[in-house]
Amino acid sequence: MDKQDEALTISNPRMLSAIYFSLLAIIATIAIDTIFYAMGVEQLLPIFKAIVLAVIIAACFGALFGKRIVYSKAPYKKHAFWWAFLMVMAALPIYTLGFLFFLHQHHADLFTGASFQDVLYMYFIVLIYSFILVGFWLALIAGLAAVYLRSYLVYYLLQSLNVRRKSPRESVIKNKTAKYGEATITPPKNNHH
């Protein structure tokens, strides 16, 4: 008899993945911005706008690829890794569009007198540098994060759903809301105050 993997029973893998990769996008954006700042690279976007852009892109692509990552079948580590790797590679061109949009708002002087062909050329230059500087490494990190999500975090969340709650005095609290007059916590046995 083939036993079904518990991870395949999680109710909303898209939302879980969107939230997970959004939180990781905040950390990655701050880390990348700090590394570039330490190397002396000028900050082209304010950190807040960069974080907002990263969170929106990560949430959208996390939701798009979340079902594939969380519901990966055996060998799930390999499948989850490659789906997350592909997710970052697919998200980077969209992120570059958003980056140029915010760059136009923050540094409008760069776009004065630029034709559509110049903006398109700038897009491809920024995209190539994005792939070279952070794209590959970010995809590797996202792949490893997806393996962690699929291997450990999903099972931890499923286990936490099935654990019975206890009061500070180690009395079991019922899972459902108590009816009127029904006690939910047993008073302590030794009350020597």
Image: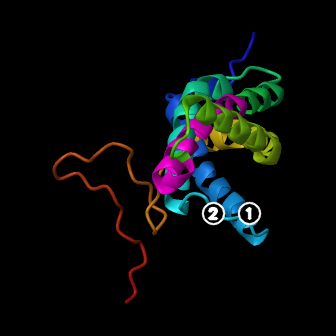
Residue interval drawn in magenta: 87-110
Relative image position of residue 69 (x, y in whole percent) = 67, 28
Relative image position of residue 66 (x, y in whole percent) = 60, 29
Q: Secondary structure at mark 2?
A: loop
Q: Quadrant of residue 50?
A: bottom right
Left or right: 79, with 20 as reference point:
right
Residue 48, which numbered label? Answer: none
Name the residue at the left extreme.
180
Q: Are the residues at dot 2 and dot 1 in contact (C-beta closer than 8 Å)?
A: yes
Secondary structure mostly seen in magenta is helix
Foreground residue among 139 and 129: 129
Left or right: 174, with 102 as reference point:
left
Relative image position of residue 90 (x, y in whole percent) = 67, 28
Residue 43, which numbered label? Answer: 2
Residue position for label 1: 36
- Residue 136: within the magenta? no
Q: Give, as a three-letter code, the residue at label 1.
A: Phe
Q: Earlier in the sequence, mark 2 or mark 1?
A: 1
**Residue at 70% across / 33% down in the picture?**
124
Q: Dot 1: within a 10 Å radius of its alpha carbon, few (fewer than 14), some, or many (20 or more) residues?
A: few
**What is the distance, in whole Å, between disc 2 and disc 1 at their CAs?**
8 Å
Relative image position of residue 154 (x, y in whole percent) = 63, 38
Q: Nearer the viewer, mark 2 or mark 1?
A: 2
**Residue at 62% across / 39% down in the picture?**
96
